[in-house]
Amino acid sequence: MLEAIAFYGLAALILGFGVMVITARSAVHSVVFLVLNFLAVAVVYVVLGAEFLAVIQVLVYAGGIVVLYLFVVMLVNQKRTPEAHHDPHRKTGLGIMLASAVLAEVTAIVVYTASAPSASPIPVSSPVVGGNTEQVGWLLYTDYLIAFEVASMLLLAAMVGAILFARRMD
Amino acid sequence: MHLYPITAYHYLVLAAALFALGATGVMLRRNIIILFMSIELMLNAVNLNLVAFSRLNGHVVGQVFALFIVAVAAAEAVVGLGILLAFYRNKETLNIDEVNLLRG
Amino acid sequence: MSLFDTDELVINMGPQHPSTHGVLRVVLRLDGERVVGADVVIGYLHRGIEKLSEHRDWQQIVMLTDRMDYVSAATSNLGYCETVEKLMQIEVPRRARYIRTILSELQRIASHNLWLGTHAMDIGAMTVFLYNFRERELILDLFEEFCGARLTYSSMRIGGLPLDIPSGWARKVSAFCDLFETKIPEYEDLLTHNRIWKERTRNIGVISGADAIAIGLTGPPLRGSGVPRDVRKDEPYAAYDEFDFDVPIGSAGDIYDRYLVRLEEFRQSLRIIRQAIAGLPEGPVVGKVPRLIKPPAGETYHAIESPKGELGFFIVSDGRSNVPYRFRVRPPSFCNLQALPRLIKGHLVADVVAMIGSIDIVLGEVDR
Amino acid sequence: MTTFVWLLPFFPAAGAAINGLFGIRWFSRGVTAAIACVSMLVSLALAIAGGVNAARAPIAREVFLGEWIPPIPAVTLKGAAAFHASWVLLIDPLAAVMALVVTGIGFLIHLYSTAYMRSEPRGSYARFFCYLNLFCAFMLLLVLGGNFIVMFVGWEGVGLCSYLLIGFWYHKGSAANAGRKAFIVNRIGDWGFLVGIMAAFFAFGTLDFQAVAAQAGRWPIERAQFGGLSIICLLLFVGAAGKSAQIPLYVWLPDAMEGPTPVSALIHAATMVTAGVYIVARNAVLFSHAPLVLAIIAIVGALTALMAASIAIVQTDIKRVLAYSTISQLGLMFLAAGVGAVSAAVFHLVTHAFFKALLFLGSGAVIHAMAGEQDLRRMGGLKRYLPVTFVTMVVGALAIAGIPPLAGFFSKDEILLQTFGRNRALWVLASITSLLTAFYMFRLIAFTFYGTDEPSSPHPPHEAPGTMTVPLMILAIGTIVVGFMGIPRTLGGANAIEHFLAPSIAETRAVAFLKVAGQPDPPGTQEMIAQAREELERDRAAHRAAFPVSEATEGRAWALMLLSTLLGATGMAAAWRFYVNHPEVPRRAAERWSGVHALLLNKYYVDDLYDATIVRGTFGAARELWRVDLRLIDGFVNAWGVTTRVLAWMSHMIDKVGVDGAVNAAGWSAGEGSFLVRRGQTGLVQNYALVIILGLFGFLTVYLLAR
Amino acid sequence: MTSMGWLLPLVQILIVLNAVLIAVTYMVLLERKVIAWAQSRLGPMRVGPHGVLQPIADAIKLLLKEDITPARADKWLFTIAPIMSLVPALIAFAVIPFGGHARIFGRDVPLFIADVNVGLLYIVSITSIGVYGIILAGYASNSKYPLLASLRASAQLISYEVAITMMLVSVIVTAGTLSMVAIVEAQLHNHVWFVFVQPVALVVLFIGGLAETNRTPFDLAEAEQELTGGFHTEYSGMRFAMFFLAEYANMIVVSAVVTTLFFGGWLPPFPNVGWLAFLGWIPGWMWFLVKCFVFLYVFVWIRATLPRYRYDQLMRVGWKVLIPVALANLFVTAILKVWL
């Protein structure tokens, strides 16, 4: 029962904040809702037994990436709002329709799968007692070490690239 | 599939909804920054999926993948926003419709 | 900082700002935190003292001079009185000259105390402020005992002093000197060798000796740049020619050097006061002054070394009316402030307050 | 202790890394020198510990550090095998002795260099110590390597360091050229060496020293025929000759004197150049099965010794005299190895390391005092100014001349004795060499320290600082005492070194070797050692039976000893007479035998010969090939070209009319026909995204419908 | 644990929240008093004996003051910013162990709200959320000084967070756990407070803590002499009070974290030394509070002593001193951990 309350409550928050992100008029407001959305997702992670990922979600996403967004939003002091200029070729309505259709289809697939007799009916495993941080770390540094190193190279490259972009051109 | 008890499939549906929301944002908005944020929403939906699968399979590999997605999202945000700033410096706008130098 | 180069930010520092020492207004154009341009706007405290003085009789003007450099009223009084005495060629008794010297050196210490306190406060050292006010309070007590006022003393008269010092005052001054000597190390402990203080002040706001002369700086800012100019030494007035003291000078011409110069002036002032107390002659404190002061027609300029720099008075008398024909002040704060715009260009916002502080201005004197 | 043997090369390598990475930019000279010297000192301490350990239990221990090259399928003489290499260090008496020499002399030379290189700029100073440390690390790897591959890493590494250090003053053209020359000549040797290693692998299926020795022991001794083992040994000897400057590959060593003097002392006298001797000693079993190659080695060694000694007589550059002397002494070592007296060769290697390092460092002090002057003729009378240098250098000269009881006497006498037993002709050559050695050494001493000429240096020469003289003194003491570990039985000694080295170089088929990887000695070690000793004695007896050597009797030993001392004294006396008492004699002699003098002065014209044949030949061949290119191939190509052009013109016409028309028509029709598609290219990112979503939608629809 | 199991955490949360809020208000009094003594003054003396009721008076004043929203401010953000600043500061207390376990009413009650297995990371991530309050406050005020200050503050927070997190990793490596409780227990088992193991980490962490809480000499974001009060220039009344509370709550968090990581949390000094066992008679939470208090005192002491850094100097200290030191420390720690 408790889990159901938590799930539906969090789902409402996540989707609600998501809607606010894409509809807010000011970009700053969007950013704030994005943070709240991420925090709600982090709570979902905790519910799903992924504490480490939840903390990383808050630390890296909410505390790092989104701060970057906020910085950029505040730095680009817009002289005319983007919504002012409208390209006639835009197919916004079609886009929303398609997105809804995709959502409906995915939902249908999941529901069918879940209802299929072969599907395992209940949550398979309860979260590991005492957390799974150690397991994540273990996997990260053994089986996925190469991927880990590649990711670090990617971050380095991104860092260098960003510095190059943002540099004053003189 | 019922509303109760909550299974991993519920989370999959939630993730799908979040993904669709992100996609809608990408379609809807013209401010590039908000576009980026919508992409972040979609990435989060993917992460949610991975964590749900990780729960479903009782294995933490999904979480490890989600960690990599976080890293990639960080790189994407950094480079994307860098490009965006450079773009803004040149054109003084953030309208996606004006990013059209390659139009046919 | 390159992320911030998208916009140039214009901010108004003052006239309502905690560290512009009154109502100075600095319009800063910022590139991020870096100052790319600065306009100094003054006049918010203009009371027209020069013009007012042309409608007051000669003794009344003493009161107006109090309101110029209000943290250093005694030296303003002295400058004015000596100018009129020079115009009228009045001989001031030796005892009066000694007491004037004591008063102006006490005033110098008090003024420097106020400066050091606020300057350190601008840079974030809060305790130094209160330490300095603790000692300044003692000086104000001495002034109160001498003339009854704590800020605007009107402590001098043309031809001498309004009254002799109270009995025991000289001893109290000596006691203060002994006490104050032990307090200077306290300031130094907090600042002189403090890494952060040095980083904030060294090589910041550098001005070379030649530039300082070209701009017209006087007082500690000039001496901080290594020019040994001091009116007390170069053109002695009051009783300064009878005492031994040194003129401290800096070398780099940065904020830190100006700070060191003023700290050394604390010690030199104590030296002068002790000599004056030891050799205080007996006699009257007022010279032969006519009842109605009406200087002969003519003009004169006389300068003294106020705590801020060279304070000069230029007075024209027509010899007929009992008011000055023309009264003009050369205020050191005003002249020193001219260095500010060229000092702060290219520095950071935080340095701006440090530089304003290091010049040591009083807006009452700048605007008059 | 044995487990930590890897620390021996590690410390100098770490010192090199620190100095190389940080020192060049940031460290002061003092810090650089401290790091370099301390790393060597630690290494020395470890080497002493290892030596004590080896003396206590003279067995070979292998230390396995890790895999390197994973197994690669290969074909060997014995069928399919896997070629693989691992990081294995081998510590046995021979390695311990070599490590002690490298670290001990290396440390002293580091210490000496701190003062000698003082006038270098800071960055250059750090670079020098980086190279020097790196050299020591590689040298230790060379002598400690447990298989050919690890040793080869060290082998190439020291070659590299030698190149870097010879060309240390790279802005000086001659130094850079000398470095290149050394490198290229060594390359020839290394080619032989590498092929030798491959051949050894092909023959034995392994490259581990112990295993090779064990295998080779089972092969028949190739007494008459030039078989597989002989080929391997010859190839290995080519490498050894390159590294150790033997005929015909010795020409690089004199030129290598362009490097700083401490480098000459360390690399080109004491350690690296002896690597060739070490190789022969290390593979003594292998070589002992190829007597023909041993004979070649002995002959080459003797000839090299004599030839170099004769050249040294007329050289006027102080360092070149010493360089030829080094070549000559190396020749003696090879002679000893060639006649089967491997332990005598190693003994001479050790003593030579001491006195030659001493002589080089002394010459460095002289050069230092003369402000860079190296020409003997411009020196003289330095005895007064450089008392310490003088005394120590005389000690070194006496040692190399073979005057008892200094180190050189014992080792050289041992070689002469052994040679006499095997071949009288070679003994004659060696004896002449030792006579010449004494002569040219004292000629050098006379030129430098005696004579009436005032030195031509602008300011009076001065004794070097303490950091330079202290190593000199230590080395002088070493020169005096190090010989005592090899006092022959004739003189009532025990010939300790021969016994000490015996397990490493005798027939080691049965010698126990243990893999050590962190654990203490396994139980039964002592028994194994005892058993090994026993078998060793048996093997030696068998060996003696197989190689009949005319046993040195007491009387003969005494006689030879006396004779060699006499020869040394004669050489000294002659030098004294010619260069101190009658300085005009040599000049007259040179005039009288001008042909011989010129021959010697020009080093038997070997360099010119190589230049005329090999170098010119190479250039000439290249030029001829270029001509062939120009005439034959270019002509052919040009003919083709003309043909092609004709064809191309025809093709062009077809293109222009037929193909271009078709293409243009296609382009035009595409351009005109794509007006519909082009509208999709809106430049709106979101429309592209829309297409992605559309694809997703389609995919999902298909999926849903299909299930 | 019966059906009332949910009650205990609730009670704990209530107690901790109230205690923290009271501690924060009295922290203000403590600061004023200590600084006053440092400056040979008396400090607040009027409200209650020696001013002990001053915090209450302050609270009443702040609550009753007019809460002004500037005319052209972004009202919604202007309201949410102080909340986003205060909430992270308060919920960080959830994982701080004030003591071990105690027996209250016959039950075994832990003296911490939660022992999360990623406790330290939790604190780091929660405090990293606090930066939003500052940025949004600066942006929402629609005023230049606050904007400048908030940019300064966020740059400062982000860059010092890197050094702090890296230093925390050193401690984590030493302790081998991320849980706050387990870190304290590790100090018990290792027989030594980690301050003796990781002294460099303590210094860097404390300097970083000063910067994170915007305290002298890193109080650039609210330097009133330069930026007239920084990002909360436009704030007044309760919303200002929230920023105020957040700052002092953050100070307490930093002190508590330092205490837990380096000074053995609730452990008495040298808990394994036999003849010092009598120190164990003082309850653990008292030790914890005493240690925290010492660090809070150091915070105030530093404020009374040092001038303020300049913005670029501050960034230089962060990037060119603290982060390299933290990296080196981490490197050395890792090497020692692996090879010892």
Image (cartoon, coloured by chain):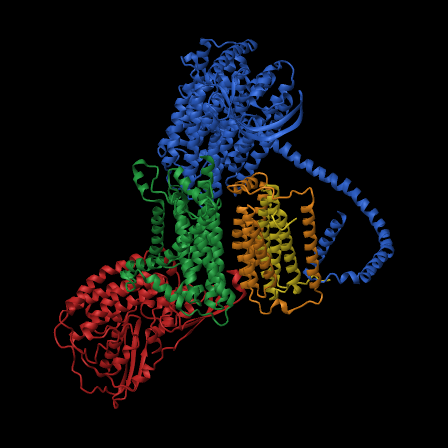
Chain colours: A orange, B yellow, C red, D blue, E green
Question: Of residues C122 and D206, which is closer to you in this image?
Answer: C122
Q: In which image quadrant can residue C305 be found?
A: bottom left
Q: Is residue D464 above or below residue C139?
A: above
Q: Quadrant of the N terminus of chain D?
A: top left
Residue D538 in view: yes
State the residue lying farthest toward the front: E3
Question: Of residues D156 and E281, which is closer to you in this image?
Answer: E281
Image location of residue A13, percent across then percent down: 57, 57
Q: Is residue D319 above or below residue D508?
A: below
Q: Is residue B54 left or right of residue D622?
A: left
Q: In which image quadrant can residue D386 be found?
A: top left
Q: Is residue C62 left or right of residue D271?
A: left
Image location of residue D675, percent across then percent down: 79, 63
| Total numbered circles | 0
State the residue lying farthest toward the bottom: C320
Image location of residue D427, percent across then percent down: 52, 16
Q: Is residue E327 left or right of residue D235?
A: left
Residue at left offset 61%, top offset 28%: D84
Residue at left offset 30%, top offset 86%: C54
Question: Of residues D464 and A152, which is closer to you in this image?
Answer: A152
Q: Is residue C258 above or below residue E335?
A: below
Q: Is residue D571 left or right of residue A41?
A: left
Image location of residue E281, percent across then percent down: 31, 42
Residue D121 in view: no
Residue at left offset 44%, top offset 48%: E8
State the residue lying farthest toward the left: C282
Question: Of residues D417 and D442, which is closer to you in this image?
Answer: D417
